[in-house]
Amino acid sequence: MAKTATITYGDKKIELPVIEGTEAEIAIDISSLRAQTGLITLDPAFGNTGSCKSAITYIDGEKGILRYRGIPIEELAKNTRFTEVAWLLIFGRLPKQDELDRFSRQLTMNASLNEAFKHHFEGFPVDAPPMAMLSAMINTLACFHPQFNKIEDEETFEEVSARLISKVRTIAAFIYRRSMGLPYIYPDPKRRYVNNFLHMMFSMPYDEYQCDPDVEAALNLILLLHADHEQNCSTSTVRMVGSSRANLFTSCAAGVCALWGPLHGGANVAVLEMLEEIHKGGLTPQHCLELAKNKESGFKLMGFGHRVYKSFDPRAKILKKAADTVLDKLGVNDPLLDIARRLEELALKDPYFIERKLYPNVDFYSGIIMKAMGIPVNMFTVMFAIGRLPGWIAHWKEQHDDNTSRIARPRQVYIGPTTHDYVPMNKR
């Protein structure tokens, strides 16, 4: 017998279906609520509202669980790479060898940008915000590849997905080179995805960048661990825009805009800004922890704890090992990284943080790893976008494959003035 929930309003009672997910998550289906009662629900920030049914990512914040298509993130981090995870998220299963080979070839073949793109980069000031440029350039891809504005079969979708995932790293590298006044470095078809990106970022025409395997592995992990995270702000934005049947480029460009916000994609930037303030202020890591414990101090310890994960961030546990390896390997002499490592060491031993489960999160480790690699802080959110792109594509596809999906159109509770007459100018 199907489960239902009863809602009583005045002298009227209605029965609403109760939906249960595969991981025993329970939701009341209120899609007929207004039709039956004239009522709507009010849920600012949608903290209690499920906007869709999805088979892509599962999170249990209480237990520190993250799974892509049912596979624990720990297994994926240990056994695979970002490009294979991209296929998994988008197409719903691990690829066979021939499928992964084909997808990898498509990533290699589509890394270059049309030469006319250079003129678009040159139209931006050298100090333009990288995320503004990234959003604009992803949108511009729709002009250069109009054949993908309408996607009607799986083969075409695979092709456009590969193009977008491939070209976004080239766009990101060119944004960095433009900001530094450096010549653009073209993609090298002999290099793998992450290695090729670092080549385009840091090579010079007379000095080719040699990528350390541990650095490549760490950046691969950062991208993989950020590839999807359920219905966050940017993913929900992609689905919102995509619900109007906007093309994939435009929908993902909107996702970039949402990710740009400091409350979403700027968390690892906030970590480095905090470290900079600590360094400039001459504070010791121990003093910072004491300030963080005092709610009246106004000091906030960035990169510790997580809104979703109430015990630990499973991505942070994975990335901590990579951070230790990269920092030891590169031996970077940077006072900010020294402060970060000391903060981590002290917090992991401090009863206050242990009892409240305020462990370093993924943003803490990704920030210090990218800093050690030489990636500038203003490019951190761009890196986040590169990693999150497969998840956005997967959600766009899931929504478009659902024949029952409709254009998203939230309701509101109007609290403005009631009807009154227009007042002529001479009487105002």
Image: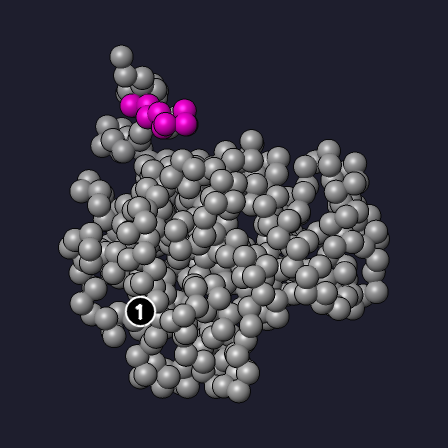
Mark 1 Cα shell of 10 Å, populated few (<14), some (14-19), many (≥20): some
**Residue 13 percent coordinates (x, y):** 30, 18
Q: In this view, does 199 lie to the left or right of 26?
A: right
**Residue range highlighted in magenta:** 17-25
Instruction: Work out whether 105 lies above or below 210.
Output: above
Q: Quadrant of the rendered structure where residue 155 is? A: bottom left
Extreme top residue here? 1
Q: Which residue corresponds to the image point at 52% horizontal and 53% vertical from the top-left? A: 221
Asked if residue 76 lies in the magenta stretch, the reply is no
Extreme left residue here? 152
Q: Which of the pair 149/194 is nearer the observer?
A: 194
Specify whether residue 159 is in view.
yes
Q: What residue type is labelled 1?
A: Met
Quadrant showing the C terminus: bottom left
Q: Which residue corresponds to the image point at 27% horizontal and 46% vertical from the top-left? A: 399
Q: Is residue 424 left or right of residue 59?
A: left
Q: Which residue corresponds to the image point at 31% horizontal and 17% vertical from the top-left? A: 3
Q: Which residue corresponds to the image point at 33% horizontal and 53% vertical from the top-left? A: 100
| Residue pointed to by mark 1 | 109
